[in-house]
Image: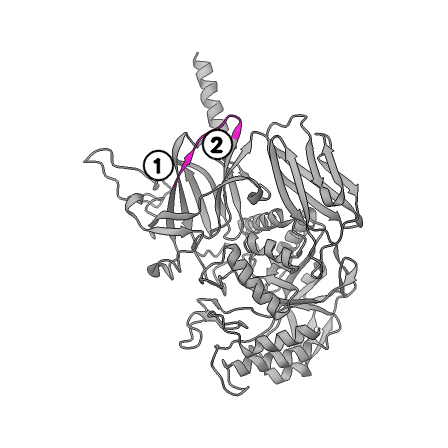
């Protein structure tokens, strides 16, 4: 009897360990879901009193687990029910004035109702939490995640109960020297649960992940791959793409499969997406998927075999509607409306993976995407944990968006100083990317060499890239705007170049002559002369000037001009178009 009891307890323990393992469920929006968006109760905890004891040691029995006083004499020094609330998704900086500059821990709590069903499983998915998250369900730790811009998911089947349940999340946005990004960045460190929170109900065995892409070596062949989670039986996977007359029944032995087909190719001129239906074990998943090829040939970039020039703009994940961290489809649509008005066919999503709404909206709008991870400036190249963190964010970025035809570039880093350690670190990330995905190009914003009137592409990192990215600020951080057309560009590599950043700051509505900094005329003059210079670079195949709109940055304190805003936007934070907007718009209209 004791041995049976032991086995029973051991099985429960093992089940909890297994159920707490992270999973990567593809296409959350197509699943059986319940939104946990809305107001969550919060406790602000700058000393992390709810996590550490007086010796500053983690205290797993003492964290804020939603305890209640059971008698008049019980001491419980917090109360979620009487605390403030924050809207999720959202950042705390723009919702509560006293948290505007806050970096530290905030505890979130949300209750939900649940009715278990036979053979069903329950997962919780967070679109993003900045920066470190520890998730508890009914007082049990179910997962932990580091990285502020990628989604994570944990199974909570064994922790949920009939009736009312509660989730507590410890959110900590403190900047860390060993973090990714590291301490110093030029964007706002928005804290909070910044993207959607979703409960997902699945059958006991379900489709966890799938990949449906055009073969990079044969544009008349579509490759399929399906990953099953659970105790798989002989049940087939059914895949239908009606418009292509594709109807597949894949038995257990054929979860990877290729089929000859000639789809219309996705492109900015024809952003064609096909309805795809995948069925397995009572679950029906619907998606819209486009097919295209992207490659390089010498200094040319080829989309579907044809040369393409990337008429782009860089954007940060800030809401054009309400300010703060962008997260909604309305935010995405409004941002892309501005991008299209500018005449772009391409956006650089800087400097981290953006939310899925803007990726999907851009795909439908025919806008190509550069997506990157926040390996930014002076990362700790020799720190193994830092590398593991960067690689995990890379994998999570690729896993979520690998079926999106408009994502054509994975970027490894931005403005990182040269060193052997940096080259090894980024080289390993590049190798990992090629293992995961051979259908896209790899880039990074590399270093340049300036000698006299010559700018040379000579960063050894470029040997490992498909497309060379480069940031330069002629007329803003060096020289004058009028110097730009006099400069000559050379390259040590037979590869295409994207100028991933150029520009300068201007306060909307501040006017003067073209030599006065911070005026719209000064910024306008930078763009006029930059475009003259860039037009003379034969290996230039795209650009993403910095930046579409002004964004918050704690590095920009100049009173009455910046006021904690980076003013390099072509549009102000209030939606006003600056004069340089029209210079770039006119250039793109005839490019």
Question: Which quadrant is the C terminus positioned in?
Answer: bottom right
Residue 112 magenta-highlighted: yes
Report if residue 482 is visible in the image: yes
Disc 2 designates what residue? Answer: 157
In this view, 517 is above or below 283: below
Disc 1 designates what residue? Answer: 61
Q: Would you identify the image quadrant in which residue 91 lies?
A: bottom left
Residue 212 shows which numbered tag?
Answer: none
Q: Pointer 1: residues within 10 angstroms few (<14), some, or many (20+)?
A: few
25 sits to left or right of 37: right
Instruction: Give the camera-side residue of 495 and 121.
Output: 121
Instruction: Give the camera-side residue of 295 and 483.
Output: 295
Residue located at (56% from left, 50% from top):
393
Give the alpha-carbon distance from disc 1 to disc 2, as whole Å. Answer: 22 Å
Q: Pointer 2: residues within 10 angstroms few (<14), some, or many (20+)?
A: some
List x then y, in percent, for residue 64.
34, 42
Span shown in magenta = 111-120
In this view, 562 is above or below 423: below
Instruction: Give the camera-side residue of 333 and 459.
Output: 333
């Amino acid at each position: 009897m004791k041995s049976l009891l032991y086995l029973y307890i051991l099985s429960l323990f093992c089940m909890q360990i297994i159920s707490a393992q992270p999973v990567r469920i593809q296409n959350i929006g197509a699943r059986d879901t319940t939104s946990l968006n809305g107001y969550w109760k919060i406790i602000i905890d700058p000393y992390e009193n709810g996590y550490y004891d007086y010796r500053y040691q983690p205290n797993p029995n003492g964290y804020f687990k939603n305890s209640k006083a059971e008698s008049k004499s019980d001491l419980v020094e917090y109360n979620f029910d009487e605390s403030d609330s924050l809207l999720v998704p959202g950042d705390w900086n723009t919702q509560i004035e006293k948290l505007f500059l806050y970096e530290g821990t905030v505890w979130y709590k949300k209750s939900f109702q649940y009715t278990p069903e036979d053979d069903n499983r329950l997962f919780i998915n967070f679109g993003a939490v900045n920066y470190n998250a520890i998730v508890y369900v009914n007082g049990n730790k179910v997962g932990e995640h580091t990285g502020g811009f990628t989604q994570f998911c944990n199974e909570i089947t064994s922790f949920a109960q009939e009736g009312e349940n509660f989730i507590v999340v410890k959110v900590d946005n403190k900047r860390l020297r060993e973090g990714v990004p590291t301490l110093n960045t030029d964007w706002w460190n928005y804290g909070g649960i910044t993207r959607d929170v979703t409960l997902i109900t699945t059958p006991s065995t379900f489709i966890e992940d799938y990949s449906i892409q055009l073969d990079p070596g044969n544009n008349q062949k579509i490759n399929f791959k399906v990953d099953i989670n659970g105790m798989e039986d002989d049940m087939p996977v059914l895949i239908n793409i009606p418009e292509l007359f594709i109807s597949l029944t894949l038995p257990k032995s054929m979860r990877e499969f290729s089929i000859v087909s000639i789809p219309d190719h996705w492109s900015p001129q024809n952003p064609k997406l096909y309805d795809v239906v995948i069925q397995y074990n009572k679950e029906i998943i619907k998606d819209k998927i486009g097919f295209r090829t992207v490659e390089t040939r010498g200094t040319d970039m080829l989309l579907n075999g044809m040369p393409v020039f990337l008429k782009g703009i860089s954007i940060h994940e800030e809401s054009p509607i309400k300010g703060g961290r962008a997260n909604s489809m309305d935010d995405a649509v409004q941002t892309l409306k501005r991008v299209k008005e500018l005449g772009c066919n391409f956006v650089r999503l800087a400097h981290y993976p953006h939310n899925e709404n803007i990726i999907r909206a851009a795909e439908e709008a025919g806008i190509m995407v550069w997506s990157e991870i926040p390996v930014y400036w002076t990362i700790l190249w020799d720190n193994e944990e830092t590398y593991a963190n960067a690689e995990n964010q890379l994998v999570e970025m690729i896993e979520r968006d690998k079926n999106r035809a408009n994502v054509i570039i994975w970027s490894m880093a931005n403005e990182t100083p040269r060193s052997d350690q940096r080259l090894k670190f980024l080289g390993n990330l590049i190798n990992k990317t090629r293992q995961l995905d051979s259908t896209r190009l790899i880039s990074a914003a590399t270093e340049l060499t300036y000698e006299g009137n010559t700018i040379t592409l000579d960063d050894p990192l470029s040997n490992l890239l498909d497309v060379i990215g480069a940031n330069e600020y002629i007329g803003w951080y060096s020289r004058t705007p009028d110097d730009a057309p006099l400069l000559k560009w050379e390259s040590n590599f037979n590869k295409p170049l994207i100028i991933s950043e150029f520009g300068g700051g201007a306060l909307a509505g501040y006017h003067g002559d073209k030599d006065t900094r911070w005026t719209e005329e000064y910024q306008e003059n930078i763009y006029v002369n930059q475009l003259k210079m860039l037009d003379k670079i034969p290996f230039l195949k795209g650009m993403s000037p910095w930046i579409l709109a002004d964004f918050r940055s704690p590095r920009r304190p100049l009173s009455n001009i910046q006021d904690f805003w980076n003013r390099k936007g072509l549009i102000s934070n209030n939606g006003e178009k600056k004069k340089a907007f029209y210079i770039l718009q006119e250039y793109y209209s005839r490019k």
